[in-house]
Image (cartoon, grey):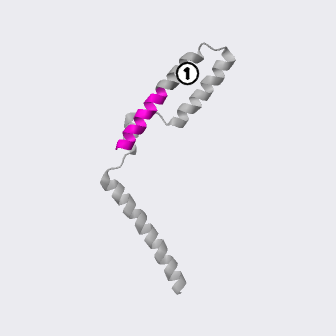
Amino acid sequence: MFAIVDAWATACRIESFFDAVARRAQDLDPDEGARVLTALERARQLLGGTDALDRFREWKTPEEATRREVGRAELVMLGMTRSILRLAI
């Protein structure tokens, strides 16, 4: 949970920076301003947004995280068992 909140807070700080860049880009000549705004849009896409609900939806409860880890462990064990059976045959 803390990681999600930290990531969201970081995204908000970066978005504030992006807003400042966009304001400054308005003072540039049209070609340079357009280049800056295009790069800025790409940077925003890479950031993934600042929507707190979207960030919260990424979080898994301890039970969900445990289930997911158990599921992975079972897959690993299943793969190992299949490998052992192939060797025995």
Instruction: Give the residue displayed 53% in from the left and 31% down from the top.
Output: 44
**Res. 10 image quadrant:** top left
Label 1 secondary element:
helix
Q: Is residue 13 left or right of residue 43?
A: left
> How many residues crowd around disc 1 within 10 Å: few (fewer than 14), some, or many (20 or more)?
some
* Residue pictured at 41% horizontal, 35% vertical: 8
* Residue closer to the observer: 38 or 27: 27
Q: Residue at x 41, y 66 (%)?
A: 73
33 is within the stretch colored magenta = no
Q: Against 16, is 49 above or below? A: below
Residue furthest to the bottom in view is 89
Residue 63 to residue 35: above or below = below
Left or right, residue 89 beside residue 63: right
Taking the image as shown, residue 58 lies to the left or right of residue 46, namely left
In the picture provided, is 81 more to the left or to the right than 24? left
Residue 32: x, y in percent? 67, 19
**Residue 65 against residue 51 in the figure, above or below:** below
At label 1, the amino acid type is: Val
Image spot of residue 39 (x, y percent): 61, 28
| Residue 82 picture location, percent across and down | 49, 77
Residue at image location 40% in from the left, 45% down from the top: 58
Rendering coords of residue 53 (x, y %): 37, 36
Q: What kind of secondary structure does the magenta stretch mostly adopt?
A: helix
Q: Is residue 10 magenta?
A: yes
Residues drawn in magenta: 1-15
Q: Which residue is mark 1?
A: 21
The quarter in which the N terminus is drawn is top left
